Image (tube, coloured by chain):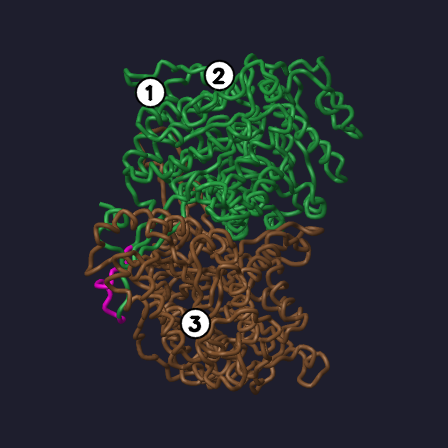
Chain colours: A brown, B green
Amino acid sequence: MTISGPEPNLPSDSPSSWPAKPTGRSIIAGRPGGASGGPPRGSREADLLSFHAVDPRTGRELEGVYQSATTAQVAEACEAAERAFRANSARPPEDRAALLERIADVIDASAPSLLALASSETGLSVERLTPELKRTTFNLREFAKVVRAGAWLRRVVNRHRDRTDHAAHPDLASLLKPLGPVGVFGASNFPLAYSTAGTDTSSALAAGCSVVVKGHPSHPGTGEVVAQSVAAAVQELGFDPGTFSFLHSGGGGPREAAVGLELVRHPAIRAIGFTGSCSGGMALAEAARTRMVEGASSEFAGGFGVEGPVADPIPVFAEMGSTNPVFILPGALRAMGDEVADAVYSSFTNSAGQMCTCPGLIFVAAGEDATRFVSLLAQRVRASEGQVMLSFRVREGYHRRILELIHTQGVRLLARGALAQESRGGGVGEAAGQPIAGVGVGSLPDRAALDSVAMLLHTTLDVFLTKGTTRDECFGPSTLIVECPSAEDMVRAARAVQGSLAASIYARVGGAIPPEDAALVHKLVALLERRVGRLVFDGVPTGVVPLEAMVHGGPFPATNMPQATAVGARAIERWCRPVCYQDWPAELSRDILGD
Amino acid sequence: MTISGPEPNLPSDSPSSWPAKPTGRSIIAGRPGGASGGPPRGSREADLLSFHAVDPRTGRELEGVYQSATTAQVAEACEAAERAFRANSARPPEDRAALLERIADVIDASAPSLLALASSETGLSVERLTPELKRTTFNLREFAKVVRAGAWLRRVVNRHRDRTDHAAHPDLASLLKPLGPVGVFGASNFPLAYSTAGTDTSSALAAGCSVVVKGHPSHPGTGEVVAQSVAAAVQELGFDPGTFSFLHSGGGGPREAAVGLELVRHPAIRAIGFTGSCSGGMALAEAARTRMVEGASSEFAGGFGVEGPVADPIPVFAEMGSTNPVFILPGALRAMGDEVADAVYSSFTNSAGQMCTCPGLIFVAAGEDATRFVSLLAQRVRASEGQVMLSFRVREGYHRRILELIHTQGVRLLARGALAQESRGGGVGEAAGQPIAGVGVGSLPDRAALDSVAMLLHTTLDVFLTKGTTRDECFGPSTLIVECPSAEDMVRAARAVQGSLAASIYARVGGAIPPEDAALVHKLVALLERRVGRLVFDGVPTGVVPLEAMVHGGPFPATNMPQATAVGARAIERWCRPVCYQDWPAELSRDILGD
């Protein structure tokens, strides 16, 4: 997607803090470190909490020390979020729309320094991050429009006087009401669009919720600078400062996990948004489902003002793992195999394959056309250079999954790319472009730079249907070709894929589906509609446009909440609940019916 | 609510099976007992599976033997439901609307015998059941209108050509798609409106799902006769017979629980609707969340056609326990205390208090008006006669909860009703109208008739805030008066109530809120909006009108899915998931864009 956003519209009274720099402290209700400022620099507590960002291009720590939030800071952020939620509930929707637009403006204004910082922390190029930033601010402005239009509230009124076909019933009016403070866990792979002011935060603010973000430890500076932008907009527009807080956590010590769990378990928090791994998402969902809050501990929605612990489960909306299968039908494979190979190659290697909608499975029917297609893909992969991955953890995960796959009987490594300086030491296996066998995890060198190479794997439908590991996501620049005995066998393949965010069907030739493939297309659509959130025709699954009709969700394990979408206007509804008012007094009409 | 539905519109070609009688066998894809007919009568297997309905008025078994479904029958129903789902997906919405209306007609036509049967199995009077039946068929017809109108699909189209403010994006269209076969667990307390063809079944059929109902063991005959009506309509309108199945289960043996668990775990089943106890709902939700399906076992959505078990969690929409608190403000208590006492009394004793929206907590501020109000309520309760409860289990649960409450320090039994024939033996305690102390569970006689009496309990806000048990539901004809030191203290009370389906605020006097209560009303609304699905003004919480604006849902423990409602047009969405189509071919335009 290409979005040419509007020019930044920076007011003259910009806070002097722009362009902002990270302070290393959490931003709690508008203040670095919160009310106390946090543990003083140089203190023993500060040392225990400190961590650094790592430059994936060098593997070295970047300048700047960050402090994981303390338990008291997490509580302060959550308590402020509840107070802000109540204070903000009296504000008209227009104020929220203005806030979203202002956040977009401030982020746009910080673009040059923000992009450089994000690139240094993620290894993603400024060219790759620039459209992500545009998309992030475009999304904020789109939500502002949705909030102004008001239809998202789904207001329904059934007046007694409007019905004649049955006897008395009361007046009823229902609409969506925001849940309260929301906790957001940003993703590592989209440091802007799915992180601090990404789709979860912006949709929750649009709903009227306040937000506490747990920053991702792999881009703490980026997260904090975006948080400063949000906090600045909150302050300028006179919103309660607790409307938004940002908590640092990292360093791999006990606080890295504890900050997130404390956020999920705080009685003020009413819902969680998460983008990341399956294990991370499921762990948070479990903590949220089983959480007990100390009833008397607080006056928050989940603090009931009563004695003893109270069961208070909250929803978690987790976007997790996705394979995004691509089905290339015989007609399209024959007529356009070369273009499709180029498109698919770009899609699965883009951003080192670190996109949640990368095509991880490619289904083709065996034959000459498939052979040519696979050989073209292999050429492209062999010619590819290594790319820097987001973090040690992500690269390790990628290599572990690749080794798991190539040690699965019936799976072959067809091609691999070359590291920019192969002499620095091998990635997976010894020689570029050669099939690899018997490479143990132990042979993975502890290299300084976090780059890795594209991998093209191949298997047959039989193996795919019998070896469960071939059906799981591999997060990184790889894809698995699954060769089916015949085109009709793609139906068995479609049935076997796991829940995914997206799937693609390449079927058209010259704008129309060849008659011999038409029946197969219908069968695939019928199956894939039940497996994915978005079905793409004659295009790659990557590229999630934040427009109203977008669905970024899907059955497990793509998400744990298949009824929801993380992108598009409907994403706002995740942070709401319908409430019905029956025979309301005139005094409340404006609140309930709007203007 | 009073609904005068249309006259039954019975066609001349009615199946000879109307008015139907129970056969004692499950209805599987239109056939009693399914393809095999089930275990033959008199066989040892049939004996092991057999159970009877009980007449709560006599405590004796009713005529007719029912057979719990076998494992093979559960699987047959689920497999047929999947085949039907696929077959039905090609049908236009108009067909589904006609099916819903036809089901309503057939049920209406069977009304006289159905009402008599339901009354004999539940102890609810024909007068009480008649409006429930009207509401059930009204609801089916309302959903037919919603399906015809089509707006429930929430279709959104973003065409590339419609946007001028940014660069290229693909064409996107999204709409709700049905999940597949749905399993429904009916409630005991509404044998029609929340059971076999109640709101879960009708909303799932409206969505385009097929349905497998697990009949409630306390009204097996009613369930089966309604199932016959649904199956007859399915057959008449030429729907695949697997569109609807009904499974008997009961007798307290291993099959009673197993039928339900097998339904939840069958790979064809994609979602569950449940109305009942908190323990039941949470157990099903746990089974659904952790379910593993045998991937190779089938060709269903959850049978992936692959080797080995596959994690395949499905959503459960459970409506569970609710206290439905009532707040009576000082002005209303003074001006209208007598009328409110009458209304509240009727509301909590109606149907022996066996309604999910019965007012279980009444908050008043201490003072003369409260004393008078409580004394009036006590008079009404003392003058009340015993009512038959739904089943041994429900009556036992009621008595256990009453004993738990009256053994809680600070809770007093203010008044109790009298059994119709008190001489038959005491219910809870010995003497009618006397406070009870030290009555153990052991003193509950194993009486034949299942009647019980109304109970009026009293406590103070301090006790309510410190003794957790006072905040839980008591299912039966009782309510707990919570006396607050002052009106302002009701705010603390509102914060302390658990998630509920509904709450009431009595505030108006002569059509307007007295100025001295206005601020308090706003505070209560702000708190209760976060605790309940429906907020009733100057009326009782009972009475759930199935119109579009209705919300029948709420935070835990009222439901496990606070974003959903079980009643109203939005209930249909529970059985759907949004799917986005990107750059779809012309050949699929009609499916995606509609006509």
Q: Is mark 3 on a helix, strand or loop?
A: strand
Q: Splitting the image into 4 quarters, where does residue A344 fall?
A: bottom left
Q: Label 3 sits on what residue type?
A: Ala
Q: Splitting the image into 4 quarters, where does residue B238 fall?
A: top left
Residue B121 horizontal/vertical position (percent): 55, 19
Task: Please check the rendered image and state whether residue B25 is part of the magenta-colored stretch, yes or no.
Answer: no
**Marks 1 and 3: same chain?**
no
Residue B412 horizontal/vertical position (percent): 73, 34
Determine which residue is flagged by label 2.
Answer: B23
Q: Mark 3 lies on which chain?
A: A
Q: What stretch is highlighted in magenta?
A: B157-167
* Callout 1–callout 2 Cβ contact below 8 Å: no
Q: Mark 2 lies on which chain?
A: B
- Cα distance between the residues tagged 1 and 2: 24 Å
Q: Label 1 sits on what residue type?
A: Pro
Q: What element carries label 2?
A: loop
Determine which residue is flagged by label 1.
Answer: B8
Determine which residue is flagged by label 3.
Answer: A415
